[in-house]
Amino acid sequence: MTIANDGPPLRDPRQDPDFDPLAESKRLLRSIRTATLATLTESGAPFATLTAIATDYDGAPILLLSRLAQHTRHLERDNRLSLLLAQGGKGDPMTHPRLTLVATAARTENPDARARFLRRNPKAQLYADFPDFSFWRAEIEAVHLNGGFARAADFGPSYLLTDLSGAEALLAAETETLAKLNADHARVVAECAAKLAGGKAGQWRATGLDPEGIDLASADATARLVFNAAVKTPEAALAELARFAAAS
């Protein structure tokens, strides 16, 4: 795929110096649960549909696709795709931030990918085990951020993805740590999530954990608690939650 780019963010020096394209891109990637999926038809024409999305530990998109769907048959023939993650909201939609990913995809039977997707999209448990459904992981090759007026950047996947080196203990304990967060620390999780979501109350739960943060969800709402620094252990993740709660 010739569009691949592994360079740092390319931005206009006239842009707002407070604009952080990497932080904004990571926020969109980790917080948006539906994306426009573009695949290629047999003739090479673009074909766009809507799909639910989650992220793997490193941020790579995880999809649950039915072989009965045209986009899945396209990917079986040509695994190139693009994903558009757009933030909704009031007002002119063209002023809202959105993230475009260029990638290739392959089926995955990794149980962690499955678990992360279903925690993020619990309604999918109704059909995830149907024989025509399978999980796919997208390997990002290029990133384009449109953060709104005069806020754009292009960069490579290594800048967007989360470094997992040394975090084996954290990843191995994700399920146990999330259960602890949602049972023993439910009130703190809910208070932190509500603050991150602009005061939106709800039945907030932690749905995912990685070295850079905690994914949170309540019904259709999502939030992301970003750590001050990358963590390697469950204890360090809990300490980051406590730090954020104390500062709130």
Image (cartoon, helix red, strand yellow):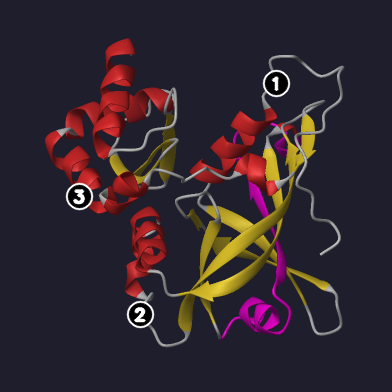
Tag 1, which secondary structure? Answer: loop
The percent position of residue 19, horizontal first and vertical second, equals 70, 21
Residue type, numbered disc 1: Phe
Q: Is residue 87 magenta?
A: yes
What residue span does the magenta drawing correspond to? Answer: 68-94
Count of numbered circles on the image: 3
Camera-side residue of 243 and 198? 243
Asked which quadrant contains residue 114, the reply is bottom left
Camera-side residue of 134 and 34? 134
Please give left or right for residue 9 compared with residue 163 in the image.
right
**Circle on res. 202:** none
Residue furthest front in the image: 166
Give how far apart the Cα atoms at labels 2 and 3 are. 23 Å
Residue at which label 1 appears: 19
**Circle on res. 129:** 2
Tag 2, which secondary structure? Answer: loop
Kindly identify the residue that appears in the image at 62 percent across and 79 percent down: 72
Give how far apart the Cα atoms at labels 1 and 2 are. 42 Å
Kindly identify the residue that appears in the image at 58 percent across and 45 percent down: 161
User: Which mark is first along the chain, 1 or 3?
Assistant: 1
Residue at which label 3 appears: 176
Q: Is residue 185 above or below residue 50?
A: above
Q: Please name which of the two marks, 3 or 1, marks the residue nearer to the observer.
A: 3
Q: Could you classify mark 2 by the number of other residues whose Cα lies within 10 Å: few (under 14), some (14-19), or many (20 or more)? A: few
User: Which mark is first along the chain, 2 or 1?
Assistant: 1
Quadrant placement of the N terminus: bottom right
Residue type, numbered disc 2: Asp
Q: Is residue 77 above or below residue 57?
A: below
Asked which quadrant contains residue 75, the reply is bottom right
